[in-house]
């Protein structure tokens, strides 16, 4: 039985993870971290991670970027692997993950869906074949409560595509402020916010007289919860380093 500490346990994603874990017999949540310390899911909840001194095998973080520093300190202090599924991290915080990964196993992904991981691989393959002759645009859609834009997944897709392109790519977020033709080395990234859209991503390859689109649509946040729990079980007993979905899923 794998013992999980859930950071952000009283948030929306925390509730999904609690539900997913309750249906499994190979893991359990032994404690939660949250600024809201209401404990109604069968485990104690602490505002300060250091207040919990019980047993645990791994941390799953689906909280807020502002919580990362104290979580990484707790992880290193207690030699606990940590899955970071929180979005909206700064470049500096991503470097902190790399530094922590020299001490403990760290799993980080901007999107915990296996389907999105496959989408990334497909987009890279398409970009390697089409990139020189096709313009590339990324459109992401999320609910009206999402704070960060563009989404971490959109940036993950753009970074993956950039890695296989023969020239350095630039990201264009604000084309309406320009009055010029589209540059060939641009990747346009567009954010849509509205309603209760869970998450939709399209990578558009627009060429001469043809368009190829790679799409992924999530209809429930549970897909991200399932991915995070599976990543947590994968991470237990691993060597310290930075892991991602490409380590977890073989294509």
Image (cartoon, helix red, strand yellow):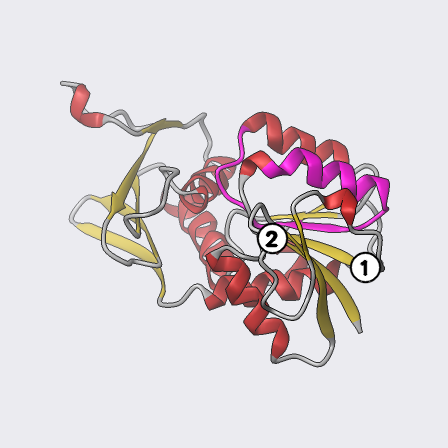
Q: Which residues are magenta?
A: 67-90
**Quadrant housing the C terminus:** bottom right
The residues tagged by marks 1 and 2 sit, at their Cα atoms, a distance apart of 19 Å
Residue 170: x percent and y percent? 38, 25
Disc number for residue 208: none
Is residue 67 positioned above or below 85 on the image? above
Q: Is 231 placed left or right of 238 in the picture?
A: left
Q: Circle 2: is it few (<14), some (14-19), or many (20+) Cα within 10 Å?
A: some
**Could you say which is closer to the camera, residue 195 or residue 177?**
195
Asked if the magenta segment contains residue 71, the reply would be yes
Residue at image position (55%, 72%) is: 19
Mark 2: which secondary structure? loop
Asked if the magenta segment contains residue 35, the reply would be no
Residue at image position (46%, 31%) is: 166
Q: How many marks?
A: 2
Tags 1 and 2 in contact by the CB under 8 Å rule? no
């Amino acid at each position: 039985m794998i013992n999980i500490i859930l950071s952000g346990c009283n948030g929306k994603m925390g509730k999904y993870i609690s539900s997913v874990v309750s249906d499994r017999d190979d893991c359990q949540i032994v404690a939660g971290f949250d600024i809201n310390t209401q404990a109604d899911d069968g485990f104690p909840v602490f505002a300060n991670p250091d207040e919990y001194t019980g047993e645990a095998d791994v941390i799953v973080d689906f909280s807020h970027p502002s919580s990362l520093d104290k979580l990484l300190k707790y992880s290193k202090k207690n030699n606990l692997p940590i899955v970071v599924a929180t979005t909206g991290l700064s470049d500096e915080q991503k470097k902190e993950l790399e530094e922590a990964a020299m001490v403990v196993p760290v799993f980080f992904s901007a999107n915990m869906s296996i389907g999105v991981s496959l989408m990334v691989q497909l987009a890279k393959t398409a970009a390697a074949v089409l990139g020189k002759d096709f313009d590339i645009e990324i459109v992401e859609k999320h609910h009206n409560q999402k704070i960060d834009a563009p989404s971490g997944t959109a940036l993950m897709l753009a970074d993956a595509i950039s890695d296989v392109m023969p020239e350095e790519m630039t990201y264009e977020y604000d084309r309406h402020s320009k009055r010029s033709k589209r540059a060939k080395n641009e990747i346009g990234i567009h954010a849509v916010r509205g309603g209760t859209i869970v998450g939709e991503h399209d990578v558009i390859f627009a060429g001469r007289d043809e368009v190829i689109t790679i799409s992924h649509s999530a209809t429930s946040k549970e897909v991200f919860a399932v991915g995070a729990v599976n990543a947590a079980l994968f991470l237990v007993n691993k060597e310290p380093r930075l892991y991602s979905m490409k380590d977890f899923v073989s294509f």
